[in-house]
Image (cartoon, rainbow, N blue to C red):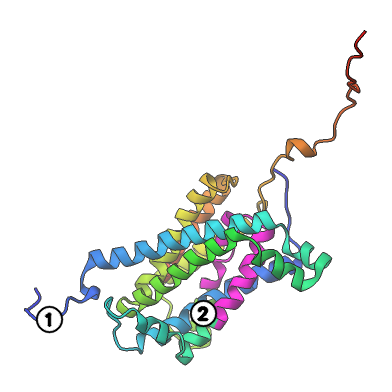
Amino acid sequence: MTTPGTPLTLTTNPWMAAAMIAAIVLTSTTGEVLTAAAMKSIGDLDVIRARSGLKGAVRAVLTCPLFFAGVFFLAVAFFSLLFALNHLNLSLVAPAAASLTLVTNAVAGKIFLKENVDRRRWVSAGLVCIGVYLLAH
Amino acid sequence: MGQHKLLPRQYLILGLVSLCAPLGDSCLARGMTTMPTISIAHPGALIAAVFTPWVAAGIALLIGFFASYLTALSWADLTFVLPATALGNVIVALISRFWLQETISLERWAGIVLITLGVGFVAQGPALTERPAPVDEKPKLEEPIVTEAQPR
């Protein structure tokens, strides 16, 4: 119960905590999928660097509009993380966001990037997801 | 699916991704927890937080992470890079145990074992999904030369 005049603390509201973590997971998944799509469209950066130097590699990345769309969502995810860390414990935010992002990325990678997410990758994502959760407790 | 095996230099890039991300996050956490509480009504305080030493150090490490991450994504799948770089969590836990002398519970050791298994599992597979070559780039078979029919 909050007394009149007392500001509502986000830390004590589990729905707000869930919303903060969901915001991090959704924006970082969107950003990572867009960034991965951008890098696949650009091609192997090591090859580009060998052919056109570091400037050529940087130019290839900075002239890709998809890359900036990805960076925008990753920036939103970053500020959502900063905001969440200010209200919640790192031991809650980091494992919850990291493990949920692994699963959402596997699903998004299969649907949007058409990656071959075979049984090996699903099992691996599952093991890492549970491992990250246990590591933070 | 072909076996896209990685070069030692590419493993080094994955190692950088693994290390920079958890170390950067730890610096951010250190910086943000020592700051006064920021309310939704004053989001500008988040911008000011960027210029504090711990948050700035965290951002520098995360820039290193991002550069290595982009390089890794240019030659490997997203669903390969993410689990493969989760080893960073294990490295941070081991540093806290053997350098900072922190106690690691049985649950945490179980987490370390699971992450290591998961990373080893995905690392044995191909790093990149093979895609069929676009139809335009396929070598053309001998096609008969079509000429316009001459009107008689």
Relative image position of residue B81 (x, y in whole percent):
60, 60
Residue B4 image point, x, y percent: 73, 52
Q: Name the subunit of mark 2.
A: B
Magenta region includes residue B82? yes
Using the numbered discs, state the Cα–Cα distance from disc 2 to disc 1 in whole angstroms. Answer: 34 Å
Provide the major secondary structure of the magenta segment.
helix
Q: Is A116 situated left or right of A103 in this image?
A: right
Please report the residue visible at 29 percent of the width from the left and 63 percent of the height from the top: A18
Tell me the number on the disc at residue B145: none
Question: In the drawing, does residue A29 fall left or right of residue B13?
Answer: left
Position of B36 with respect to B72 (left or right) is left
Q: Which mark is residue B24?
A: 2
Q: Quadrant of residue A25?
A: bottom left
Q: Which residue is mark 1?
A: A6
**Mark 1 belongs to which subunit?**
A
- The residue sitting at 24% across, 64% down in the picture is A15
Q: Residue furthest left?
A: A4
Camera-side residue: B69 or B3?
Answer: B69
Amino acid type at image mark 1: Thr
Mark 2 on the same chain as mark 1? no
Element carrying mark 1? loop
Magenta segment, which residues? B60-89
